[in-house]
Image (tube, rainbow, N blue to C red):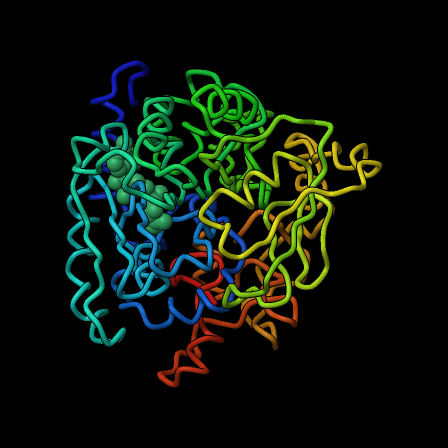
């Protein structure tokens, strides 16, 4: 059992889990660490070019890598074997930089060992480094104040014994206009100590899950603009023993965007934003969050807070924003989706789907039935045998079996893991 209030015991429990207990994502007992939806095709293509040793140890629960970050300085909190850093290194190009911070030596070793090989694939030496450190102490890890444009993190902050310190450190490390864009595991309530201290639940990103309301309040108190939700998926716990332990608590993988901008609070001013269509991979529209999808060539009414984000964050180069004459639309703009409502919808979507998320071994298609789980994959062992995972990731509504590995780039794209780190599809 990890002990509450003692960071060192939490650190050693988590280090042990990621450094010694797990050898690859096949060893996970729940789908929490691999619950994310399919990455964007641009990202999938890059993942296909990353050394498999890195991909095999991917334990993320989402896709917290924004496109359009060319030339930017990126920090990854809890970078693990480095998959997201490798992707970010390809996206920032030779003029940007990527730094991964992690506390587990074994993970860092895998991350560092494959940088040279990846550089050969990229055709340039990426400014990509992995440093040993704690995400609660970024300065000590060598991350200077106001040095980062985009901070990403995938399924890590839940593991921290002091989440407030993490958010404060990120706020300090970000430049004005920077952003924390991250996926993590959240709970719909505060969790009892029996869940929070359970080694497996903790290690699998459930025990330390952040309570959404508490987290959102904490982020705003630190100075971030209103947290924006980009995606929500329900995480089902299949293991009967672990399920009994968590009781009625429900868990979600949520991707949030926290901008370090001064948000205008002027409720009476309306603005128009136009997306220029210049982000590779988002040529026709840009999804800022669940409420704002900006279509190229279609001026969109936005509230003052959103205008601040689009005109003064790192995204500003992709938008033009100007005041609107039409303030009549403001009432409608106030209807921002509540996170609770989004979680409820994700839960219902999951509950209404098929209970078995793996296709039978001999399924002719080798695919999961569609709509079977918005939360992620089957329990790892089932995934292994059937080779299936989260549905709706291919146009057919499911993933392809694992066995079709190929070296051809086009085919590689099709066979990429879409719900985890290479253990299925
Ligand atoms: C669930 S894994 C995710 C790894 C990586 N982000 C990925 O997507 O594959 C969690 C990682 O966070 C690291 N970690 C957890 N707590 C940390 C802390 N307080 N400081 C630094 N690293 C931490 C662990 O060592 C582990 O590599």
- Say whether residue 351 is visible: no
Percent of width and height locating residue 349: 71, 46
| Image vertical order of residue 42 relative to residue 152, above or below | below
Q: Residue at x 54, y 55 (%)?
A: 37
Query: Furthest residue to the bottom?
Result: 408
Ligand 1 quadrant in view: top left
Q: In which quarter of the image is residue 102?
A: top left
Q: Where is residue 107 in the image (x, y as percent from the top left)?
A: 21, 49
Q: Is residue 87 above or below residue 1?
A: below
Residue 290 in view of the camera: yes
Q: Residue furthest right?
A: 328
Locate residue 78 relative to residue 132 in the image: left or right: right
Q: At 27% across and 48% down in the image, what residue appears?
A: 80
Query: In the picture shown, does residue 290 fall above or below 42?
Result: above
Q: Which of 83 and 310 is in front in this view?
A: 310
In-front residue for pair 15/172: 172
Image location of residue 369, percent across then percent down = 66, 63
Which of the pair 61/359 is nearer the observer?
61
Above or below, 272 relative to 120: above
Asked where in the image residue 20 lies, by quadrant, the reply is: top left
- Residue drawn at x 19%, y 49% is 130
Q: In the displayed structure, does residue 262 sit left or right of residue 323?
A: left
- Residue 5 lies left or right of residue 306; in this view the side is left
Left or right? Give the position of 82 relative to 202.
left
In percent of width and height, residue 25 lies at 35, 53
Please count the marks in the image: 0
- Residue drawn at 80 percent across, 36 percent down: 327
Q: In the rendered view of the protein, which quadrant contains the N terminus?
A: top left
């Amino acid at each position: 059992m990890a002990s509450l209030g003692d960071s060192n015991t939490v650190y050693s429990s988590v280090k042990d889990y990621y450094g010694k207990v797990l050898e690859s994502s096949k060893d996970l007992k729940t789908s929490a660490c691999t619950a994310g939806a399919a990455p964007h095709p641009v990202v999938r293509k890059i993942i296909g070019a990353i050394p498999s040793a890195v991909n095999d140890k991917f334990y993320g629960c989402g896709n917290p890598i924004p496109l359009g970050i060319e030339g930017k300085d990126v920090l990854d909190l809890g970078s693990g074997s480095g998959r997201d850093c490798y992707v970010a290194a390809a996206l920032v190009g030779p003029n940007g930089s990527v730094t991964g911070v992690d506390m587990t030596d074994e993970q860092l070793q895998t991350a560092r060992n494959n940088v040279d090989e990846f550089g050969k694939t990229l055709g340039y030496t990426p400014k990509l480094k992995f440093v040993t450190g704690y995400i609660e102490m970024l300065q000590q890890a060598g991350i200077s104040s106001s040095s980062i444009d985009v901070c990403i993190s995938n399924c890590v902050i839940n593991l921290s014994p002091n989440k407030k310190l993490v958010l404060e450190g990120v706020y300090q490390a970000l430049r004005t206009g920077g952003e924390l864009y991250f996926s993590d595991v959240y709970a719909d309530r505060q969790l009892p100590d029996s869940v929070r201290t359970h080694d497996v639940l903790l290690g699998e990103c459930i025990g330390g899950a952040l309570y959404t309301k508490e987290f959102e309040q904490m982020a705003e108190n630190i100075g971030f603009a209103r947290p924006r939700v980009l995606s929500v998926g329900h995480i089902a716990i299949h293991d009967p023993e672990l399920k009994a332990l968590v009781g009625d608590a429900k868990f979600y993988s949520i991707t949030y965007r926290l901008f370090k901008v001064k948000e205008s609070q002027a409720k009476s001013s309306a603005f128009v934003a136009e997306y220029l269509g210049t982000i590779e991979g988002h040529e026709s529209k840009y999804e800022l969050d669940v409420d704002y999808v900006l279509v190229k060539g279609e001026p969109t009414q936005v509230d003052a807070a959103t205008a601040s984000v689009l005109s003064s964050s790192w995204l500003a180069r992709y938008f033009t924003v100007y005041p609107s004459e039409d303030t009549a639309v403001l009432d409608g703009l106030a209807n921002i989706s509540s996170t609770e409502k989004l979680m409820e919808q994700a839960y219902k979507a999951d509950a209404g789907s098929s209970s078995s998320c793996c296709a039978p071994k001999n399924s002719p298609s080798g695919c999961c039935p569609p709509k079977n789980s918005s939360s992620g994959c089957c329990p790892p062992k089932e995934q292994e045998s059937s080779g299936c995972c989260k549905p709706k990731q291919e146009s057919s509504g499911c993933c392809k079996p694992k066995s079709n590995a190929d070296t051809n780039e086009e085919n590689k794209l099709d066979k990429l893991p879409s719900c985890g780190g290479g253990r299925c599809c």
